[in-house]
Amino acid sequence: MPAVRAGGDGNRGRHRHRDPGVSQSRRSDGVIVTDKLTLRYREGSGPFTASNTSITLGAPGRQVTAHPSWPAPPGPCEFGTACQAEDGRINGGESVNYDHGGFAGRGFTADYGQVSASDGWTVTGVPADGDYALQVRYANGGTVARTLSASVDDTAAGSLSLPPTGDWDTWGVTTLAVHLKAGTNTVSTMCAADDGCNVNLDSVALTTPGAGYPTRSTTTPPPADEPGQLGGWTRGLDAYTNQAGADVNAVQLHPGILNRRGWSLLDDTYTALRTDDGWARPRPDRQGAYQDGYLFGYGRDYKQALSDLRSITGPADMLPEWAFGVWFSKFFPYTTNDYENELIPAFRTNDVPLDALVVDTDWSHAQRARRHRRQRPEVPAGSGNRQRQAATGGAMLLADLLPLRLERPGSGEGMVLAAPPVRAAGRAPMVA
């Protein structure tokens, strides 16, 4: 197996290599040999760089030697400048959006609507130990003040108060006093359990107290392409202007593991960690240089590369059969009467089957409740009676109208009520 995991703590000059599932490999100090590649690292030389790390792998008719370079950490920013929210370490469902005006940089972050959504930046050049100002440029188009939690170097630093700004195209600035050490500090904003959240962030800045909000930004966007890249990945298939920009056909894929050069480095240093209850949280801050990732070396054996990825991530969940049937989903606050007397009867009247009914995001709409909690709505057990299913926002479903099965939604999504309740007359169900 050519996938090799590598990580290290630059302060101690240590490193580790782990090739999951590799049955035939040889190891010695700083060298790993598999059936696909030879990885060399100069012991005691600190973090992995192009100067102390090399791989040699076979390609059709030739051998390739490369010097992997670890990507720059997301969110690096200089003290006294604006740190763009969309270029920080985004976790927990936070996403880059473009559908409102007035932002700086290439966009802003939205979806601070669920507990654990966060963003973070590594700020360099703090002049001395002392008290400073964390300034946050945000939009709150609601009618009540919101809050977010702030931390510095993984230690709670207080709560940010975010009053309404009038609309989502108007941006305001709020300030929180924080204590910093000289040099480099990591600052984060998060939707914690007791926060109001539900705001958009344009940027943050660490400044001296009383300083105006900076106009210069020093963050850089993540790479959208790599030489030799073969495809890649994107956050979702539902590309639309608020996540794609002005042209929904111009969505750029993030680099995947397949590349014509025959190898790829997957940086895992800043990805979220899964909690015991199956949710996600940001990784804790670490002092000094720290790296964690997977090196794939496959030459032209792209199928093997995908197999290696599967061995690391586990098999992808397959969609249930009913998911390939007919869905209905509309972002609209339907009432009980709408469902009972208009929507469902219309499917029957027009001889159209229905396999999945999505009670869309109004059931936990991020802007219509003070807090959005990641809770699975309870569907009462059926007893043959006309029991109602709560779907907040005014939508109520009758259990005897639809024999519903509740599926766990994704972050910020509506709940999916799935079953084959409506069938066209005289026609076999589309989904068994």
Image: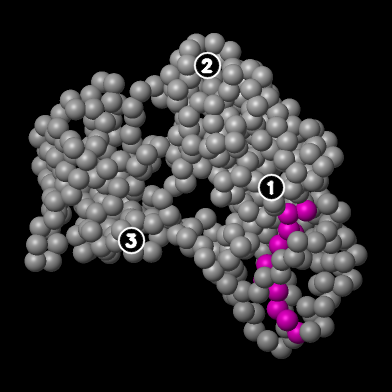
Tell me the distance, in whole angstroms, between the alpha carbons under discs 3 and 1: 34 Å
**SS assignment at label 2:** strand
Which image quadrant is residue 406 in?
Answer: bottom right
| Residue 5 or residue 108, whichever sits in front | 108
Is 355 magenta? The answer is yes
**SS assignment at label 3:** loop
| Residue 331 sits above or below residue 84 on the image | below
Measured as percent of width and height from the top left, residue 122 is found at 47, 30
Q: Residues within 10 Å of mark 1 (few under 14, many from 20)?
A: few
Which image quadrant is residue 149 in?
Answer: top right
Q: Residue at x 68, y 59 (%)?
A: 416
* Marking on residue 180: 2
| Residue 270 sits above or below residue 63 on the image | above
Tell me the distance, in whole angstroms, between the alpha carbons under discs 3 and 2: 40 Å
| Residue depth check, mark 1 versus mark 2: number of the one nearer the observer | 1
Q: Residue at x 40, y 37 (%)?
A: 73
Is 386 magenta? The answer is no
Residue topped by disc 3: 229
N-terminal-most mark, 3 or 2: 2
Segment colored magenta: 351-362
N-terminal-most mark, 3 or 1: 1
User: Label 3 amino acid?
Assistant: Gln
N-terminal-most mark, 1 or 2: 1
Taking the image as drawn, is residue 152 in sight?
A: yes
Residue topped by disc 1: 102
User: Label 2 amino acid?
Assistant: Leu
